[in-house]
Image (cartoon, rainbow, N blue to C red):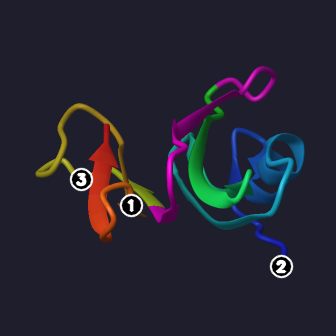
Amino acid sequence: MVLFLVVAGLTISTVLREFAVNSSSDPDIYGSIVVWQQFVEGDWDIYYADITNPASPEVFNIADYYDQVNPSVCRKAWLSPFGNIIVWQDNYYGNWDILKIQ
């Protein structure tokens, strides 16, 4: 599957190819933030990349214990006037919860 969304000269597929070294899926993008889930060491983890500076994008692991899946990134002024919100499903506590980071 090739995604043609382009931010700051980078496509989602370029970011995943450059930074996602294992099985990756479910990418999402808003502004200069790209999120995806990646299968690492036996479970699914959530990663995001800040591609504000395409020459030097920053990649972060949000959570890496148990399974985290279905990431999404958005910015809604009525939810968060301070920036992007990343949400995902998390199985850390043994049942599926919706967690966020901003």
Work out whether 37 lies above or below 64: below
Q: Amino acid at mark 3?
A: Lys
Q: Which mark is first along the chain, 2 or 1?
A: 2
Q: Secondary structure at mark 1?
A: strand
Q: Judge the density around disc 1: few (<14), some (14-19), many (≥20) Cα neighbours within 10 Å.
A: many
Q: Secondary structure at mark 2?
A: loop
Task: Looking at this view, name the residue that lies furthest to the left.
Answer: 78
Q: Position of residue 26 (x, y in %)?
A: 62, 69
Q: Position of residue 65 (x, y in %)?
A: 50, 47
Work out whether 76 lies above or below 59: below
Q: Residue at x 78, y 45 (%)?
A: 10
* Residue at numbered disc 1: 90
The circle on residue 76 is 3
In the drawing, does residue 13 fall left or right of residue 92? right
Number of the front mark, 1 or 3: 1
* Alpha carbons under labels 1 and 2: distance apart: 25 Å
Q: Residue at x 84, y 73 (%)?
A: 2
Question: What segment carries the magenta color?
Answer: 53-71
Q: Amino acid at mark 2?
A: Met
Q: Position of residue 19 (x, y in %)?
A: 81, 41
* Residue at numbered disc 2: 1
Q: Judge the density around disc 3: few (<14), some (14-19), many (≥20) Cα neighbours within 10 Å.
A: few
* Alpha carbons under labels 1 and 3: distance apart: 22 Å
> Could you say which is closer to the camera, residue 96 or residue 19?
96
Tag 2 near tag 3, CB within 8 Å? no
> Could you say which is closer to the camera, residue 94 or residue 4?
94
